[in-house]
Amino acid sequence: WRGILGVDITLERLLPVAAAAARELEASAPEDLTSREVVLGYDRRFLAPELAAAIAAAVRGADLEPVLSESPTPTPASSWAVVERGALGALVITASHNPPEWLGLKIKGPFGGSVEGDFTARVEHRLAAGGITVPIPGDTARFDALGTYVAGLKAKVDTGALAAGLERLGLRVIVDPMHGSAAGVLPALLGQGAVESGVIREIRAERDPLFGGHPPEPLAPYLGELIAAVRSSTAAGQPAMGIVFDGDGDRIAAVDEHGRFCSTQLLMPLFIDHLARARALPGTVIKTVSGSDLMALVAENLGREVIEMPVGFKYIAAEMLAGEVLVGGEESGGVGFGMHLPERDAPFAALLLIEALVEGGVPLGQRIDALQTRCGGAAAYDRLDLRLPDMAARSRLEARLAQAPPTEVAGEPVREVITTDGVKLRLGPSHWLMLRFSGTEPLLRLYCEAPTAERVAQVLGWARELAEGI
């Protein structure tokens, strides 16, 4: 639940939502789960710590036990704490990658991931029913959520070997947490020695609730400082890689040694290759319909089944809970791993990214280029978010696409129309355009993958003209 702080998100509105969510966590708990704890986490946004402390009273009013993080943490740290403590779930005060004036609430289940749509529907039903939970003030137990999380990740990955491997390769890692709550996590994981030797360093690590004037979303237009730092290091003879986290640390992107922005469209194929080939871990690959064809090409090259889902990590998490999954990811930066939590966890993904480079012995850009050479796949991708005049314009375009989808796009015949989520027009191998509407506003998202950046721009321009002409 996200909205404008002070308009949509107020303490008066937040308390009953927190109470209803806590009661539903108790009501929906597995029979063998006897804990009464609800973990409370928060990011670095304005008033997030204060609101997290305040909703503890609502949890107590529901006759449950709130336990509050003693510091801002990445959202996956709250999910980890739930599993580690055997708690009922977590309530996290965060607005993730949204603009600075936003705040919100995320609900995590006892399995360590986001609750599903039927759960939130039951929370809404509780709110509509009008039941009253009287908040109970009191002292709230606090715990070191960040330390618990770092220790948990260190138990899964040999971080000392990663730091030594980076030193051996002469590769430096520059981390940009975008002023968010993942600041300090990767240096803590790789160790003080890695910091002192310059193997890893952070930029924009201090708290800034305005996030430097941009949404804390890992997109190339917001990463000028990181891209410049990587290029400067590489030009000085010290090859570097940039790693960027969003505001609450559940989305990741990277910058290769040449300053190229690498979204999960390029990182997911690398994760697939590393986990399936080098680690030989079991499981299928889950990608969203907006994900790069390179993901499927790499997976199929390694004999792995690929399942394509609608956009949204909730669909990936459902598959992770239902069966054996190697890795699942979406184009917007969320990646989850079957050996970990059914949850987007950017710091854990960063460790596996470093592990893949240490195993391969070459910098990020070279590794990605080698994958594309081996498996084929497009070299360019971009997304354009287009705000339509009003909902009526959206309805006209939606009807047009449903009744008579284009048979040609920017001079290329449409070979296949896919309607898993929105309308995806396949134009050729690793060449497609996807049009997908926001669920609640007159916003059209245009996605394109093509052999060259020039062709991507051409197709997106064609799609913009189509949308604006209806």
Image (cartoon, rainbow, N blue to C red):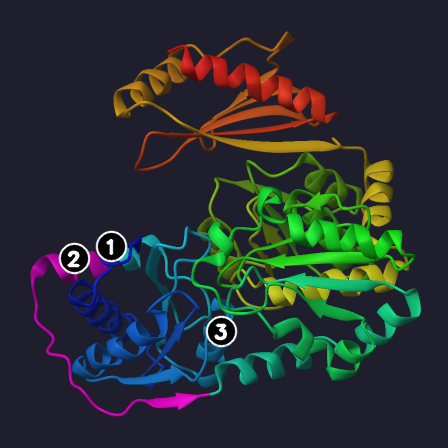
Question: Is residue 261 one of those drawn in magenta?
Answer: no
Instruction: Determine the image quadrant of residue 154.
Output: bottom right
Which residue corresponds to mark 3? 73
Which quadrant does the C terminus fall into?
A: top left
Q: Secondary structure at mark 3?
A: loop
Task: Decide which of 182, 205 is in the foreground and name it.
Answer: 205
Residue 390: percent from left, percent from top: 28, 24
Q: CA distance from mark 2 to mark 1?
A: 6 Å
Instruction: Report x, y in % for residue 170.
Output: 90, 65
> Cβ–Cβ below 8 Å for labels 1 and 3?
no
Image height check: is 4 above or below 381?
Answer: below
x, y percent for residue 272:
72, 52
**What type is the residue that disc 3 sits on?**
Thr
Give the residue at x 71% y 31%: 380
Residue 408 in the image: above or below residue 150: above
Cβ–Cβ below 8 Å for labels 2 and 1?
Answer: yes
Please give the residue where the numbered disc 1 appears in the rendered image. Answer: 121
Q: Amino acid at mark 1?
A: Ala
Residue under the point 63% across and 17% down: 458
**Depth order, front residue of 460/403:** 460
The spot of residue 12 in percent (x, y) is 15, 66
Q: Which residues are magenta?
A: 122-143
> Circle 2 sits in a helix, a strand or a loop, which is it?
helix
| Residue at image location 23% in from the left, 58% down from the top | 6
On screen, 348 above or below 266?
Answer: below
**Which is closer to the viewer, label 2 or label 3?**
3
Q: Which residue is mark 2?
A: 125
